[in-house]
Image (cartoon, rainbow, N blue to C red):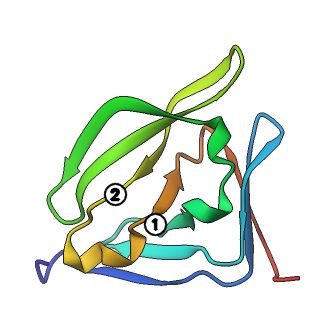
């Protein structure tokens, strides 16, 4: 990690519910908030708390020099789909190891709700 590009990961407080086209696609109290340099924090949701039946692996891959290679999913239910709406780091670099087996969502493709924990 470069000193001018810090990355930190911490548990997100409360409950996070992700909705796509009115459907709950993820619901967790175990989200992680990843803060990277001067970017806004990104919430990462454990795969175990997502409805993976609606996730379809896409061919898209990108590389972050700090976190590693990102893989993408399309959200799909029948004819409805949003391509590459979700990304994941399946083998993140050590500085981002906590986000392995987690998913992040583009906020312009889904609704992300943060609530106090039940």
Task: State how far apart marks 1 and 2 are (Cα).
Answer: 18 Å
> Could you say which disc has been placed on residue 89 in the image?
2
Name the residue: 62% across, 46% down: 52
Q: Residue at x 41, y 70 (%)?
A: 99
Q: Is residue 74 above or below residue 98?
A: above
From the image, which quarter does the C terminus lie in?
bottom right
Residue ID at (53%, 76%):
32
In this figure, which residue is indicated by the disc labeled 1? 40
Q: How many marks?
A: 2
Image quarter of residue 50: bottom right
Tag shown at residue 54: none
The answer to whether residue 8 is left or right of residue 10 is left
Left-right relation of 81 to 71: right
Along the line of sight, the residue nearer the viewer: 1 or 81: 81
Q: Bin the neighbour count of mark 1 within 10 Å (Cα to Cα): few under 14, some 14-19, many 20 and up.
A: few
Relative vertical location of residue 95 with respect to residue 23 in this rendering, above or below: below
Hey, which quadrant is residue 11 in on the image?
A: bottom right
Within 10 Å of disc 2 (Cα), the crowding (few <14, some 14-19, many 20+) is many
């Amino acid at each position: 990690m470069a000193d001018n590009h810090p990355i930190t990961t911490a548990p997100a407080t409360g409950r996070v519910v992700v909705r796509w086209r009115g459907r709950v696609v993820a619901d967790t109290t175990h989200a992680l908030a990843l803060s990277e340099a001067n970017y806004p924090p990104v919430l990462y949701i454990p795969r175990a708390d997502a409805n993976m039946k609606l996730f379809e692996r896409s061919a898209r891959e990108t590389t972050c020099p700090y976190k590693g290679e990102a893989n993408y999913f399309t959200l799909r239910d029948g004819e409805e789909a949003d391509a590459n709406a979700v990304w994941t780091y399946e083998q993140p670099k050590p500085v981002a190891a906590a986000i392995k087996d987690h998913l992040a969502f583009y906020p312009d493709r889904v609704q992300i709700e943060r609530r106090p924990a039940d």
